[in-house]
Amino acid sequence: GAVVSQHPSWVICKSGTSVKIECRSLDFQATTMFWYRQFPKKSLMLMATSNEGSKATYEQGVEKDKFLINHASLTLSTLTVTSAHPEDSSFYICSARDSSMGNQPQHFGDGTRLSIL
Amino acid sequence: DAKTTQPPSMDCAEGRAANLPCNHSTISGNEYVYWYRQIHSQGPQYIIHGLKNNETNEMASLIITEDRKSSTLILPHATLRDTAVYYCIALPYSGNTPLVFGKGTRLSVIA
């Protein structure tokens, strides 16, 4: 089945640091990937839609200069949290769908837990 | 996208069938019903989806009413590992449409 891999799974860093999270589709190609954020005991919130070869589309209230998204290939999207602060601490999750096949569901990575000290 | 309504929580005895309801009374003709679950500290896991016919796979069965205004996810023999938050989402079939998560149903399987 379709597998989405995220890396790293857990990161702790100092305030002011930039952190890059990778999302890979391991056995399929994805022209579109999605990034979500989840705070404790809350549901997933869509942050942005990552489009291969073009600019990402951000949801209202998500700062595009704060959360940089790059989708340089059909199997890789990256989310960079720039100048991270404690309030950016959260669980970040990506999802993707096989673009080449019809009627395929989206699959999710295992998430990245980001802790900013 | 159609709004879905789910009970906030449910309990189920281990080994029994877990029946999770979802109301989607405003669903449109081109929207599928998707079910995902999220086990604590993991990414959501796809379970099943359907348009109007009942569906079954190795994980669960999906029963959609004839008017498509509601559906039920059935886990035939719940185990402790099925304890999770279950999300029902109505979504047009499109690769570029993101899943929008509500609050879901927290299913607790009890030994």
Image: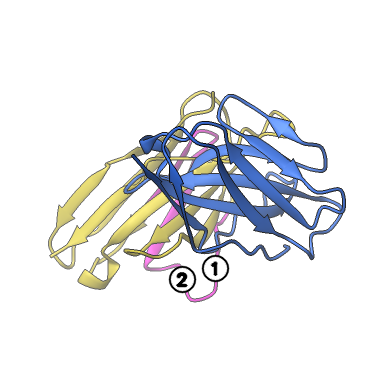
Question: Is A17 situated above or below A95?
Answer: below
Q: Position of residue A103 (x, y in %)?
A: 73, 34
Q: Tell me if mark 2 has few (under 14), some (14-19) or many (20+) residues whose alpha carbon lies within 10 angstroms of its own.
A: few
Residue occupying image coordinates x 73% and y 41% = B63
Chain that the image shows in yellow: A
Q: Which residue is mark 2?
A: A62
Q: Which residue is mark 1?
A: A59
The tally of labels here is: 2
Chain that the image shows in blue: B
The amino acid type of the residue labelled 1 equals Glu
Can residue A53 be seen here? The reply is no
Write down the region rendered in magenta: A55-79
Task: Confirm whether the magenta stretch covers residue A70.
Answer: yes
The answer to whether B81 appears left or right of B62 in the picture is left
Residue occupying image coordinates x 43% and y 42% = B13
Disc 1 to disc 2: CB gap under 8 Å: yes
Task: Confirm whether the magenta stretch covers residue A77.
Answer: yes
Label 2 residue SS: loop
Residue occupying image coordinates x 22% and y 70% = A85
Label 1 residue SS: loop
The amino acid type of the residue labelled 2 equals Val
Question: Is A53 situated above or below A28?
Answer: below
Q: Position of residue B57 (x, y in %)?
A: 63, 26
Residue occupying image coordinates x 25% and y 66% = A83
Can residue B40 be seen here? The reply is yes
